[in-house]
Amino acid sequence: MKTTNRIEPPTFGTSSLLLIFASLCLTVFVLLTLSTVQADRKLSVVSANIVSDYYKADLEAEEIFSMLRAGIVPEAVIVDQNRYYYSCYVSPTQSIAVELSYENGIWSVLRWQSVTSNS
């Protein structure tokens, strides 16, 4: 009787398939994490710029208020009897609106509010 030796291809076992699947899952999770980190970084930069712009405008509003208390009325201020109105630019869509009152030597802040600009 003849005996033939067959060469069988190597078989992948269940553990090998599980290892390949786990490696693919980890790779996908790593890529998702990296894209999330990039998106969060962009968002934090934009947020920091918005906050910085707001506080620059708030500082400008404080400086104008300081000039008014010193008796200097800047050109940007609208005066109506004992009320003073002005706004400070924050961004194309936002500004700080200020309304002050001066009666009997006392300054009162009636409005110091961030408002949406008409754009």
Image: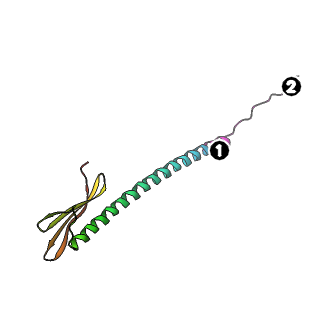
Residue at figure coordinates x 83%, y 28% from the top left: 5
Sequence-wise, which precedes: disc 2 or disc 1? 2
List x then y, in percent, for residue 66: 26, 71
Where does label 1 land, which residue? 19
Residues at badges 2 and 1 in contact (C-beta under 8 Å)?
no
List x then y, in percent, for residue 113: 25, 62
Quadrant in which residue 110 is drawn:
bottom left
Residue neighbourhood size for the residue with mark 2, other residues' Cα within 10 Å, grouped as few (<14), some (14–19), many (≥20): few
- The extreme top residue here reads 1
For the N terminus, the image quarter is top right
14 part of magenta stretch: yes
Residue at figure coordinates x 74%, y 35% from the top left: 10
Image side of residue 47 versus residue 99, left or right: right
Residue neighbourhood size for the residue with mark 1, other residues' Cα within 10 Å, grouped as few (<14), some (14–19), many (≥20): few
List x then y, in percent, for residue 24: 60, 43
Where does label 2 land, which residue? 3
Q: Is residue 2 above or below residue 115?
A: above
Please state the extent of the stretch shown in magenta in the rendering. 3-21
Q: Amino acid at mark 2?
A: Thr
